Amino acid sequence: MKIILCWLVLSVSFLFSARADLTIVYSSTIAPASKTGNDEAAEPARAGANMTIKIKGDKARIDASPQLTTIFDGKTGEVINLLNDQKTVVRISPDKLKAVTDMLEKFSDKKASPEKPKLTPTGQKETVNGYETEQFTYNGPGFKAIYWIAPDYPDGAAILAQLQSVKSEFWDAANTKMPDFRDFPGLPIRTRMILSKEMPADKPGASPSGHDTEITSTITSVGHDPINNSEFLVPGDFKETKLPDIFNKPKPAPSVSPNP
């Protein structure tokens, strides 16, 4: 779940007027993190599930893997999860998201700094997929992120603005404390997430060796072709499944002593 949340992070801000539809495709690899910082010294990476993000108006669709699709409706605040292999849909209302946020805050580390981490430039530059990038780091709770940001990516400012337009309480509820896209000086075309080894080794994506897990995702294509509205609808053959109501459990009735 932690890996999926980190994949799905799209922070929020302002609307970009008269924007076209947007499709972004990422490729990814997952591997145990290198302790030396040298990519060549790290254990071999394995291919991860590629991710596709589609944005049309106030709606966003994220295909994090063939098994999982997440649809967010910016007008209603509802998050829809499609479990494709099971043909099941799980809807999460804004109220449920708020309850998740409150629960995570309750069990969060009270010693953690209340201040949000900041993007820090490393001064390093690198060419990624033909574009000059500047490297930034970000140290969050339980993870470290490295961003390769391309200030001169074609239409980068417009793409960044569309990503900012996706207002989602889901990311806040996930409590990932990821940077806001407003903080980026350009489009991040490569992102490396190093997740803490506190993740149980038997969870999907965790390293069997117990090392920190490293996920690297790189933009492979950006398109502005029209997206069909049906992409943001629940397929007719999917069945609804309700989340267990763990936040509003009825209080047990007081015990009654038997009559003497």
Image (cartoon, grey):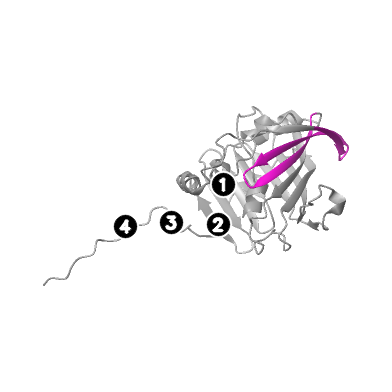
What separation in Å lies between label 1 and label 3 (alpha carbons)? Answer: 17 Å
Front residue of this view, candidates 22 and 131? 131
What separation in Å lies between label 2 and label 4 (alpha carbons)? Answer: 29 Å
Q: Is residue 212 left or right of residue 132?
A: left
Q: Which residues are magenta?
A: 123-151
Q: Main secondary structure of the magenta part?
A: strand
Q: Is residue 34 left or right of residue 21?
A: right
Residue 108 visible in the snapshot: yes
Number of numbered discs: 4
Front residue of this view, candidates 114 and 226? 114
List the residue tagged with mark 4.
Answer: 251
x then y, percent, for residue 140:
64, 41
x then y, percent, for residue 221:
80, 42
Nearer to us: label 1 or label 2: 1
Label for residue 174? Answer: 1
Asked whether the beta carbons under mark 3 and mark 4 sit within 8 Å of each other, the answer is no
Q: Quadrant of residue 60?
A: top right
List the residue tagged with mark 3.
Answer: 246
Q: Is label 4 in a helix, a strand or a loop?
A: loop
